[in-house]
Amino acid sequence: MRVALYTLGCKVNQFETAALAEGFISKGADIVNYTQEADIYVVNTCTVTSRAAYQSRQILRRVRRSRKKARVIATGCYVQMGAQEILDAVPGQVCLVGNDQKAHLVDLAFELEDGLEFYVGNISRVTTITPFTVRRQLGRTRAFVRIQDGCNSFCTYCTVPYARGRSRSLVPELVEKQIKIMVQEGIKEVVLTGIHIGMYGEDLSEKTSLLGLLKRLCAAFPQLRFRLSSIEPSELTPDMISWAMSTPNFCPHWHIPLQSGSDKILKRMNRHYTSSYYRNLIMELRTAMPEAAIGADVLVGFPGEDEPAFEKTIELISDLPITYVHAFPFSPRPGTVAAAMNDMVPKKEKARRGKAVRNLGNEKKQAFYRSRVGKIFECLVEQQDKETGLWKGLTPNYIPVLINTERDRTDLKNQILTVRITKAEEEMALGTLLK
């Protein structure tokens, strides 16, 4: 049995796809690239934006039309939210497996008969996290570990609470067990991820916190580098910053969503902080951790975002020591509060604002890279660059580095090397190996 998997969307989806792949392998299947001939195709969909939903439909149509004899299974957030849209858009028979049933997908794939099968339940009733286990994510030196799923925040633009359900945490013992497996497989860095990881532990019978988990993991695995995928502004506490400053194996890298620099827009988004709160947090973080990378998400063109509101976002990003920015145009998602709001921003204007934010973010990123020229970092080598043949590594503070070395270039993957940054390019830095 040959199985192909395709993933759209977030790091949680990537982790879950890796777990599904291992489930298929445990049943004797061979995993192949989705462009190859296979007996079963699994598409792990996303619906966070209209484009993500479109891409999910597109890949399903492509697979269904080109692989007429194969079994095609769609799973993930778009299945949970837009099953009928998929059925209307994709020719032929497709099996739909919602997020609430994803843990059973591998078994279902072998039990299914040809034809339409529908396994989508009420995700809001799910009270425990699916205990997926991954030995190693194929081809990766850094591993994603999902510690939490779901969200209780209900930002007015977001479908995630409806697609993923309420916040659910993996108990610390199982997180530690998962990481032990990855250590045995040679992983050198773990990225803790989830849908809303700042809420980690609040739902467990023995309550804990994200900081409690971080302290436990960094102490238990001193040889591993740890970093977080993202954390909300109100959940990055002074205690967490103070602990991070004094913990050598926690990477100085924070991704802290902003979304807007306008308090009016933040309120309409149901984001529970102000622009001044965000400003003070970033300045305090930079003072405490001068070498840290600080990333931000920005959602442009939200309903009611006039030019003055957008300019406040530009001004705030310009003023702050942010090192990179991910910009997204607002996409009205069916069923959300924002989809029914007035004062929609025209598509062309959203595109202009998104470009302006991305350009500013690139300037920030290049300035950060330039400011680190001459500094020494421990780089985790991930892969060889196809154009130059040089090995590419990642610093703890999230700078991609092409490493100039006289050593044999065939044996450096997954090693941590001491590198001095010698030059800053547009998308990465150049460095020389010191030892």
Image (spheres, rainbow, N blue to C red):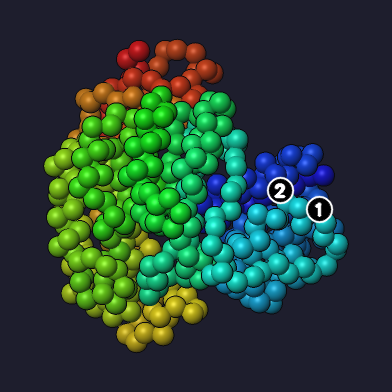
For mark 1, what is the residue? 110
Residue 221 seen in this snapshot: yes
Q: Point out the tag, 1 or 2, that comes first from the N-terminus.
A: 2
SS state under label 1: helix
Residue 324 makes an appearance in the image: no
User: Which residue lies at the image location 34% right of the left edge and 87% below the top edge?
Assistant: 342
Q: In this view, does 407 lie to the left or right of 270?
A: right
For this view, does 120 lie left or right of residue 177? right
Label 2 SS: strand
Q: Which amino acid does label 1 sit on?
A: Phe
Q: Residue 4 carries which label?
A: 2
Marks 1 and 2, Cα distance to the nearest angstrom? 14 Å
Q: Dot 2, how many residues are within 10 Å of its Cα: few (below 14), some (14-19), or many (20+)?
A: many
Decide which of 119, 282 is in the foreground and name it: 119
Question: For the residue carrying disc 1, how many other residues have a C-alpha within 10 Å: few (<14), some (14-19), or many (20+)?
Answer: few
Quarter of the figure with residue 257: bottom left
Front residue of 214/361: it is 214
Indicate the position of residue 349 as horizontal and vertical percent values: 33, 74
Residue in the image at 82% along x and 44% along y: 1
Percent of width and height locating residue 4: 71, 48
Check the image and report above or below for 15 versus 338: above
The picture places residue 139, in percent across and down from the top left corner, at 57, 34
The structure residue drawn at horizontal position 37% and vertical position 33%, both measured from the top left corner, is 218
Q: How many marks?
A: 2
Q: Are marks 1 and 2 in contact (CB under 8 Å)?
A: no
**429 lies above or below 118:** above
Residue 94 locus on image (x, y percent): 75, 66
Identify the mark at residue 293; answer none if there is no mark: none
As drawn, 76 above or below 396? below
Instruction: Tell me: 114 left or right of 214.
Output: right
**Residue drawn where x is 77% and y is 68% of the image:** 117
**Kind of residue sitting beneath label 2:** Ala
